[in-house]
Image: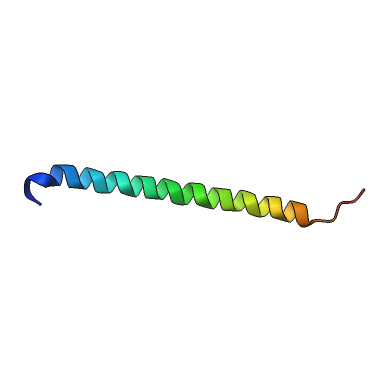
Amino acid sequence: MGEYGQFVWPSFLTAAIVMGALVFLSLRSLRRAKKTLIGLQEPNET
């Protein structure tokens, strides 16, 4: 990559960190949504 490597590799690292954070946040949101759905599907005992 020559002289551009000093710009390319940090960009790849930044993109990987951002993608990892998006995966983490998406999975956390999915888990919360599943818990909410299960709570709403349970019959109310009133």
Instruction: Identify which residue is drawn at 92% across, 48% down.
Output: 46
Indicate left or right for 21 with 43 as reference. Answer: left
Instruction: Identify which residue is drawn at 38% across, 50% down.
Output: 19
Q: How is the image coloured?
A: rainbow
Indicate left or right for 18 with 45 as reference. Answer: left
Instruction: Identify which residue is drawn at 44% across, 48% down.
Output: 22
Q: Position of residue 9 (x, y in %)?
A: 20, 47
Count of numbered tags: 0
Q: Is residue 27 above or below residue 10?
A: below
Instruction: Identify which residue is drawn at 53% across, 52% down.
Output: 27
Indicate left or right for 30 with 22 as reference. Answer: right
Q: Position of residue 41 (x, y in %)?
A: 77, 57
Q: Position of residue 40 (x, y in %)?
A: 76, 52
Specify the farthest residue to the right. 46
